[in-house]
Image (spheres, rainbow, N blue to C red):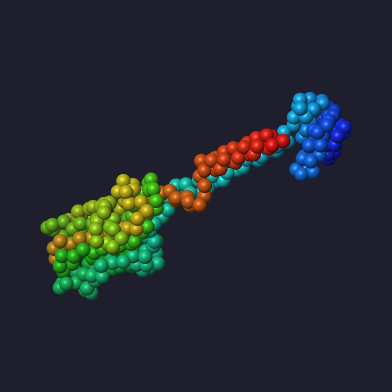
Amino acid sequence: MRDWPLCDAGDQAVAAGMTYVLRGAMATRSVLLADRSRVRCKFLARRGTASYDEHRHPVNIWSLKLDSVARFISKLLTSCSLIGALWSCGTSAQAVELIVNGGFETGTLAGWTTSGLTVAGACGAGLNATDWTVSNSGAATNCLNPGAPPVGSFAAYNMFDAGAPTTYRLRQAVVLPNAITAATLAWRDSITDGHSGAPRVFSINVLNASGTVVLATLYTFNSANITTGWVSRSVNATVPLAPLSGQSVILEFSAAIPAAWTGGAGMGLDAVSLDVTGAAAAPASIPTLSEWALIGLSSLLAMFGLARMRRHST
C-alpha cells in the first residue's frame, strides 16, 4: 500500500491518477486531523473534486472514520452470526443412550437396583423366590429355564413364580434430556410360563425420582402358560417421556406374581436400551443473534451522533 503524505497548505496529493489541491483553513484542519487521527491525503482524495475549498467542499473526516467503523461492525455482526450458528450446532438436538449396563455384560447388576426379595430355593416350595439376578445361564431362575443369554455372555433373570404374591422390580435411575423430540426403548425378553390362573404381568414403567409414583407405563404383557423364547421388542416412548423432559426418573422392569405356586416359570431380560433425542439449552452468557444486532445498531447510532456533533463543533 502506498504511504500517502500528510496534507499541508498548498500541497498537492496524487491519488488514483488525480491531483487534489488543499487550500486555506482546509489544509490546516487536514494537518490537525492527520496529526491526531493519522488521516492521510488518500482519504481526502475519495471525497470529491480536484480542488477542495473549506467553505464550498467541506471534508468530514469523521464521516470517513464512521464508514470504516460501519464496515467493521458489519464484519463483526457477520462473525457473530457465524459464532451463533456454530453455537447452535453445538447445542442442537442429539440422541443419547441413557441406560448403563443395559446388556448386563459386567456380570453384575451394576447401575441397577432390585427389590431384594430373593429367598433361596427352587420353585414350588415354601416362600422361595428368585429376584432379578445376572447370570450366563437361564438356570439362574431356580425354576423353568427361559434360555441362555441371546446377546453377549450375560442376561438378567427372575423366577417369575413365588411362594407368595410378589412383584420383582428391576430399576435404573436416569436423567431425561431437555426438550425431548424422540425416544425409543428397546430390549429382549424371554418367558417360559407353565402356570394357570390369574395372569402374571410383565410391565415396564416410568416412575418419579423417589420411585413412589408411576408416571407412565411403556409396555405390558400378560403371561399364562406360554413359552415365547427370546424376542426383540421396542416401543416409541416419545409421547409419554416428552412431558418429563429434564426430569430425573426411574425406569422399572416389573414382574408381578398374583398368586403363589400356580405353576413353574422363568423370565429373562437382555439388551436394554433407552435412546432419547433432546436439545441442550445454550448458556445464557452467550448473546443471541438479535442481541448482537442490537449491540451493532446502538454502536452505529452512537457513531452517527458523534460525527454530527463533531461537524457542528467545527
**Percent from the top left, x then y, of residue 287?**
52, 47
Residue 16 higher or lower than 116, as above or below: above
Q: Position of residue 275 (x, y in %)?
A: 39, 52
Residue at the outermost front position: 313
Whether residue 210 is visible: yes
Instruction: Say above or below: 286 vs 255.
Output: above
Residue for point 12% across, 58% down? 197
Q: Is residue 241 above or below residue 109?
A: above
The quarter in which the C terminus is drawn is top right
Residue 296, image x, y percentages: 58, 40
Q: Quadrant of residue 6?
A: top right
Q: Residue at x 37, y 65 (%)?
A: 111
Residue 237 x, y percent position in the rendering: 32, 49
Q: Residue at x 55, y 40 (%)?
A: 293
Residue drawn at 22 percent across, 73 percent down = 119
Q: Nearer the viewer, residue 175 or 312?
A: 312
Whether residue 268 is visible, yes or no, is no
